Image (tube, rainbow, N blue to C red):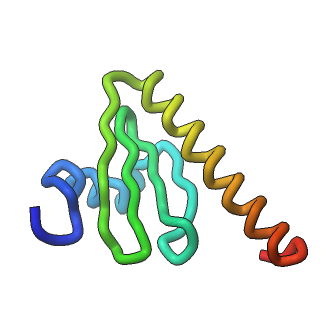
Amino acid sequence: MIGKFDSVEAEELYKESLNGGLDDEVGSVSEAGWFGLMDTFILSEDSQGFVSLDSFGNRKEAERAWADVQRQYAEYWGEFDSSNGGHA
């Protein structure tokens, strides 16, 4: 698919996320990317504005993947803070 979204489903869920459909979110496209959890899906948007969708078989799998996203994001910020003398 040409454009900002990697699938039609990604586009539909992204639009839904803009209307408060997310269960949780972390990040910013201007930093290490934006990630949003929605039921059994994880949306991500990079600094170029491209949106990707990861789909999981059930909520438990999605929550495990979400915990990994949060851990990686926390590690990114920990490394960023320590490389800048503790300043973001």
Residue 82, by quadrant, is: bottom right
Eyeballing the image, is 18 above or below 10? Answer: below
At a point 51% along the width and 31% down the height, the residue shown is 63
Q: Position of residue 25 (x, y in %)?
A: 52, 53
Q: Nearer the viewer, residue 75 or 10?
A: 75
Q: Nearer the viewer, residue 79 or 65?
A: 79
Eyeballing the image, is 6 above or below 85? Answer: above
Residue 16, by quadrant, is: bottom left
Image check: 68 left or right of 39?
Answer: right
Eyeballing the image, is 69 above or below 11? Answer: above
Eyeballing the image, is 62 above or below 26? Answer: above
At a point 16% along the width and 71% down the height, the residue shown is 3
- Which corner quadrant holds the N terminus? bottom left
Q: Position of residue 40 (x, y in %)?
A: 36, 33
- Which corner quadrant holds the C terminus? bottom right
Residue 5, by quadrant, is: bottom left
Q: Position of residue 8 (x, y in %)?
A: 13, 54
Q: Tally the numbered discs.
A: 0
At a point 62% along the width and 49% down the height, the residue shown is 72
At a point 38% along the width and 35% down the height, the residue shown is 39
